[in-house]
Amino acid sequence: MKLLLLVVLVWTASDEASADRNLALEGRATMSSIWMDPDIHQSFLGMAINGIDGNTDSNYFHGSCFHTGLDSPAWYRVDLLRTSRISSIIITNRGNFGKRTKGAEIRIGDSLANNGNDNPRCAVVTSIADGETQTYQCNNMVGRYVNIVLTGKTEFLHLCEVQIFGENLPQTFSCQI
């Protein structure tokens, strides 16, 4: 006779931890490529992590923005490390060359197919003035990955902050003994 024991653990955050907050600060960022400045032969200024460092400084040369290479499509992704309910996303544009973000799509989901760029769309960036900040409502979309992607064109993608507001969903763990 076999004995089967199934244990299910459900972890939920405390009320304080589950309140609507900037989840990006705890996430991991990556992007399609990193721009290499031909004059100084360095790329540290435009690293992916700069887009979720909590600093909305829109001057690229202050080191708090990300910058992809000239890609088709250029994309930026934040892995929230667990599935979350996203209420809104706030984007701070670079202080110059801001028109490059026109037409960027914000996508949210749990899939990494096509680098996450095929997940459901929350919003399209119609325009953000140089150095300005804009809020996009995502109406509690659910997903682990938040992508910003420029589809249909070859372009640089650079922003200075991506804030992702929402709450983590409870995690369920199960094991079979």
Image: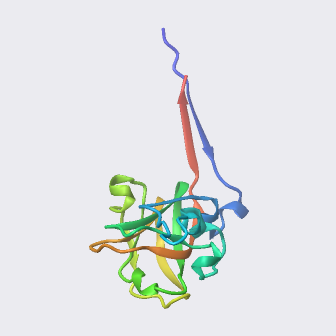
Residue 125 location, x and y as percent?
41, 82
State whether residue 15 is above or below residue 7: below
Q: In this view, does 57 lie above or below 112?
A: below
Quadrant holding the C terminus: top right
Residue 80 picture quarter: bottom right
Of 27 and 168, nearer the camera is 27
Q: Which residue is drawn at 41% across and 87% down?
A: 99
Q: Nearer the viewer, residue 3 or 46?
A: 46
Residue at (60% x, 67% y) in the render? 50
Instruction: Give residue 52's quadrant in the image.
Output: bottom right
The residue most toward the front is 39
Q: In this view, does 3 lie above or below 25?
A: above
Residue 81: horizontal and vertical position, in percent?
55, 53
- Residue positioned 64% across, 64% down in the render: 25
Is residue 14 found left or right of 121 in the rendered image?
Answer: right
Residue 12, percent from left and from top:
64, 51
Locate residue 10, reporting x and y percent: 60, 44
Q: Nearer the viewer, residue 143 or 148?
A: 148
Q: How many labels sit on residues?
A: 0
Residue at the top extreme of this rendering: 1
Going by the picture, which residue comes out furthest to the bottom? 129
Looking at the picture, the colour scheme in use is rainbow
Residue positioned 66% across, 71% down in the render: 54
